[in-house]
Image (cartoon, helix red, strand yellow):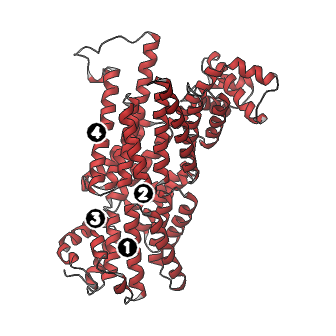
Amino acid sequence: MPLGKQFAQELAAALRLRRIQQGITMLTAAEADIARLGPDTPEAASLLLLMAQWVDAGYRDYRVLEPLLARFPAACRKRLPMDDYIRLRMVDSFVDLAKGDLDAAIDTLDLVLKTYQDIPDQEQEALVHFWKGRMHRKKGEYDASLKHIVRARELARDRDKFFTAIIQIQESWLLFQNGMGKEAEQVLDRAESILISSDHYVALANIESARGRIVRRSGDYSKALDHFSRAIEIYERRDPNHVNLARTLVNAAYVRRLLALQMRKRIDTQAHSGRARAGTAPKDVPTTRENPITRYQRIWQQAVDGLTRAREIYALHAHFDGIGKVLLNLGYLHLDSGDIDRAGNEATEAYRIGTEQNDHILMARARILETAIENAHVEEQTGEDVDVAVHASRARQYGEEAQTLAQSTQNRRLLAGACIARGMTSANDFFQEWETARRYATQATGLIGPGERDHLVEDLASLKARIIQASGINDTLRSWSEGIVGNKTFQQITEEFAEIVIPKVWMREEQKISRVAASLSISPKKVRRILRNSGSSRKS
């Protein structure tokens, strides 16, 4: 079928009904004609905007649009009808979104929305708000993002149920970021109930991936990995090189790293308690009784393999911020294994990519990793005394930069991570600034939401344990008894006292929360919160 009005109408109908295979088949068959698309092609601007939406739905990637847009230079666009000019500007913004140039994309869509104030077009305006919401989300501007996503849903609700469901996937994540986990899962369920009748594999896999990220934050890593595995299976069934598959591979690798860390802690605990034995399990031991060290190494390697595959996919799509996320995760894995120099190289490269993309979230995460790396140098006392001082100074600098970058977003967990990094630096062997470390631990505690029991809570618990162990419980209590409280409020002192006392009572009461609550006449909910914050029980 030649390009033109009929082709555009059929392609638009396939998109509206989310008949993904039909649309991709049409576009594939018309590739030769599309390659010749230009200002003289009937419905050219409409076709280009449709193609951008199809790229979003799973057809190839943004680079198919760039040579076509180049055939519409400024001089040509001046002669176009206003509707067509707006459509081309929307395609420009989509390409900028895909490339990571978010500020340019947002500026373009701001101009488009101003036009729609005078020339209303609800269908296209819904698309503008949807894309703009995603741009703000990637920048960590969650309030602005939610505003546009909700507006997109309102405009699409009575016109396109499938598009409404796709918008809801974005909305669910924003609700989750605002601490509304149950509401987020309900929105995902509603979206899936609509999309399940389509073959929109990208959206269906996105739903599974989103569920994995929600569950991960509760600390149920095995269940999160199940969701990611299902998402990977859905993506691979249609496109083994889809860019969202790479994102999910990164998420799965991240969870595998956390599982490996938990396993290593158990191995270390057994070693310290004298239960560990040298060597490995006998050769005839079944896989269900795999040696813990072997299993740790296997999970660690699976994480590396997943990231390697993700990087290959991101490279195919020239998706640089994705490559940056791969490098971050590799950096943590190599830091965990003791390869500090390699971790440092990966963190440096991730920060460079973040700088080029003006991605404050990626930059902040890279600086948090670099802070951990410099603190590892301090703890291991690598080099001469002057070298240790240099590493400590860098840790402080990187931690400060991470906090500043995190504060430029609305990502409270990113800011919590930066506060923990600064606390760890204050509590390292070089500085030993315990009051400063406590201040950052308190700030991080206020940023972590209820019900969150993932690695961030564990990192905070490690910081608090280090502070208590090094500064001494007796010294702390003695200072308080003498009225030396620093700048703390009475509420902060009460919380710190509870984190000292309640874990001790919990141990005496055979780790029974109900007994602690009865003994101290406080609610079980508060006991659980204090135990979680102090790191005494991840299951509390």
Quarter-of-image position of residue 462: top right
Q: Contact, CB < 8 Å: mark 1 with mark 3?
A: no
SS at badge 1 = helix
Toward which corner of the image does residue 521 lie, by quadrant? top right
- Nearer to us of marks 4 and 2 is 2
- Mark 1–mark 3 Cα distance, whole angstroms, equals 15 Å
For badge 1, the amino acid type reads: Val
The front one of 256 and 403 is 403
Eye-nearest disc, 3 or 2: 2
The residue wearing badge 2 is: 357
Mark 4 element type: helix
From this viewpoint, is residue 156 visible? no
- Tell me the residue at 49%/51% (across/down): 361
Q: From the image, tell me which residue sits under label 1.
A: 91
What residue lies at 64% left-to-right and 41% top-to-bottom?
446
Residue 252: image location, x then y, percent:
37, 42
Q: Quadrant of the N terminus?
A: bottom left
Q: Earlier in the sequence, mark 1 or mark 3?
A: 3
Give the x, y percent position of residue 504.
65, 19
Which quadrant does the C terminus fall into?
top right
- Numbered badge on residue 59: 3
Q: Is residue 302 visible?
A: yes
Q: Residue at x 48, y 34 (%)?
A: 372
Instruction: Tally the marks.
Output: 4
- The crowd level at tag 3 (other Cα within 10 Å; few <14, some 14-19, many 20+) is many
What residue sits 53% from the left and 62% below the top? 145
According to the picture, the residue beneath numbered tag 4 turns out to be 305
Label 4: how many Cα within 10 Å (few below 14, some 14–19, many 20+) = some
